[in-house]
Image (spheres, rainbow, N blue to C red):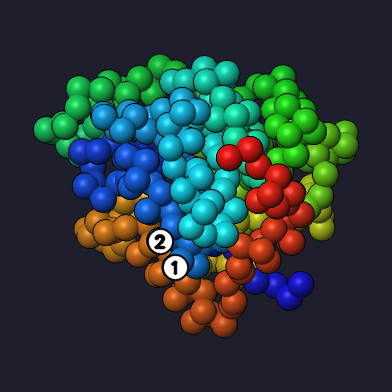
Amino acid sequence: MARKVIITCAVTGSIHTPTMSRHLPITPTEIATASIDAAAAGAAIIHLHARDPATGFPSADPAHFMEFLPAIRDACDAVLNISTGGSSVMSLDQRLAPARTAEPEMCSLNMGSMNFGIFPLLDRYEDWQHDWEPKLLEATKRTIFRNSFEDIEMILADLGDNRGARFEFECYDMGHIDTLAYYLGKGLVNPPLYVQFILGVLGGIGAAPENLQAMKASADRLLGDAYHFSVLGAGSMQMRLAQLGATLGGHVRVGLEDNLTIERGALASSNAQQVHKVRRILEELGLEVASADEARELLELKGSDGVAF
């Protein structure tokens, strides 16, 4: 297949809270609508978290996921990618419950334990809609986002070998690429690997062009032709790093999980607005955007008929 760029849209996540943007999808209907609209705008993959519809608190309850997964599947052909990261304050079993239930084509897999600091967001707001919001942010000062070697191997076997999922390997730092290369050498992961370079989370590698170039150079050396990569720039670096990543031969990820704005000082009105913007950038670079079925072919996914929702 001629090179086309996959756009992933991460529609809600567990980082931003309701106070931060009125456009953040919270309820199952809002998450479904945001996902369907993002797919219509050009996103081939939708990266999904859930929230408690009453409070907006990040949720790993499979019942919350099942309130929007079938609706998205029935309305569009996008690849639905379920997070196994959930939130750093969740247990591993909680984080895995949605993917174990839904058996998706694709799910995320974080490639190492780390500090995952979102507490700096506390300084930006004074009046919170919910008491849990500042408490959740403050908790990231003292929690470790656990992804041990044992955890990784269990997820590869449970969701990959047993349930047929392929993975979005999330690499927040250079050492995470070495870990993935180790598992490639052991035969526990198989090409084509889909590697998400994540830049800009406090505790991981910073959101700088030089860091992205270094991550790609490391992956080229360690993974060779066994991988495709995508770029996630957190916060204000989202579009700039997406453009650089595409220029370097990669794919892109946008969405309100990663960045709430559309330009400096202006909140994005929707996930679809970000997808439209990055699609325009890609097309102005002379690149074509991949369809969902082209993404499935490139990443060798099992297909939407193999899921459990």
Tell me how far mark 2 sits from mark 1, CA to CA: 6 Å
Which numbered marker is on residue 41?
1
Q: Residue at x 69, y 58 (%)?
A: 296
Task: Name, please, the residue furthest toward the left.
Answer: 127
Secondary structure category for the residue under label 2: helix
Residue 106 in percent (x, y) is at 64, 44
Crowd tier of the residue under label 1, counting other residues whose Cα lies within 10 Å: few below 14, some 14–19, many 20 or above = some
Q: In front here: 223 or 63?
A: 63
**Residue assigned mark 2:** 37
Quarter placement of the C terminus:
top right
Is residue 290 left or right of 225 when viewed as pictured? left
Residue 306 in percent (x, y) is at 70, 45
Query: Is residue 249 depicted above or below 87 in this figure?
Result: below
Query: Is residue 221 depicted above or below 126 in this figure?
Result: below
Residue 28 visible? The answer is yes
Name the kind of residue labelled 1 in the image.
Ala
Q: In front here: 57 or 114?
A: 57
Residue 199 visible? The answer is no
Is residue 89 left or right of 226 when viewed as pictured? left
Secondary structure category for the residue under label 1: helix
Choose top left, top right, bottom left or bottom right for residue 89. top left
Q: In front here: 148 or 60?
A: 60
Q: Are marks 2 and 1 in contact (CB under 8 Å)?
A: yes
